[in-house]
Image: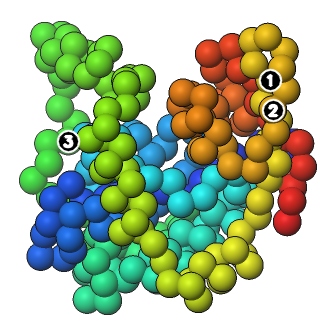
Amino acid sequence: MSEQQLNQFYVYAYLRSKPSQHGPKYSPFYIGKGKSDRAFVRRNRITPTPADVSFIVFVQEGLTEEEALNLEKFCINLYGRIDNQTGILRNLTDGGEGLSGFSPSSETRNKISASNKGKTKGRKLSEETKRKISSATSGKNNPRWKKEVTLETRRKMSLAKQDFQMSELAKQKMVATSAMYLYELIDANGDVYVTENLACFARQYNLTVQLLRLVVNGKQKHHKGWKARIVEKLK
């Protein structure tokens, strides 16, 4: 397996769109680990995916699965869980269970079952219902649709980053345990760029970091004519 395939995981957070009894607006309510477009998937989720993608932030990208699992556990422990009265997250476990072949405990299965009670399962959808769902999630209704970032959205993203700040000790621990990568990007004209931060690069050149991540991981050939790959593991 190539290094690009190994380093395709990331850790993400869902932020509150309004204050609640568990935390202020822009505080994280869920921490997850994934790859590809996992952070934006809506189906088969116990915790709902934010409708506004500006409330989805990436803690770190370009990780191996083991690194992502460790960082996920670290972040969940940092913010704590609502169900066991240790913090503000809606996660039902301490993380680290996403590794292939993992079998959840009976307690976790019971929590998932309780969370799913009342939801309709196994119902066959009519063609009309399918058409409505398709229409509701097509084009600009799709959360992954590329849209212009307004000043208000930028303000919310800025506030989200401020509220997601960790203590200096937490940052030191994260830096010590996290990998960093050097990315090479080539535009449609053949000009070559190098960066250590894919998200910042995407914002600077009006690109979508999630789609660039697909290119880096070999899931997509290019994004807006840009090609990208990992050229070196820095640490």
Amino acid type indicated by mark 1: Ile
Q: Secondary structure at mark 2?
A: strand
**For residue 186, which numbered disc appears in the image?**
1
Query: Does residue 182 appear in the picture of this structure?
Result: yes
Query: Which image quarter is the C terminus in?
Result: bottom right
Name the side, left or right, on which 12 lies relative to 233: left
Whether pointer 1 and pointer 2 mark residues with C-beta atoms closer than 8 Å, the reply is: yes
Residue furthest front in the image = 151
Query: Residue 11's image quarter?
Result: bottom right
User: Residue 5: horizontal and vertical position, in percent?
Assistant: 77, 42
Tag 1: Cα neighbours inside 10 Å, few (<14), some, or many (≥20)?
some
Instruction: Tell me the residue at 33%/80% (across/down).
Output: 81
Residue holding disc 3: 121
Question: Viewer-proximal residue, 19 or 138?
Answer: 19
Residue holding disc 2: 193
Q: Secondary structure at mark 1?
A: strand
Question: Viewer-proximal residue, 235 or 193?
Answer: 193
**Which of pointers 1 and 2 lies earlier in the amino acid sequence?**
1
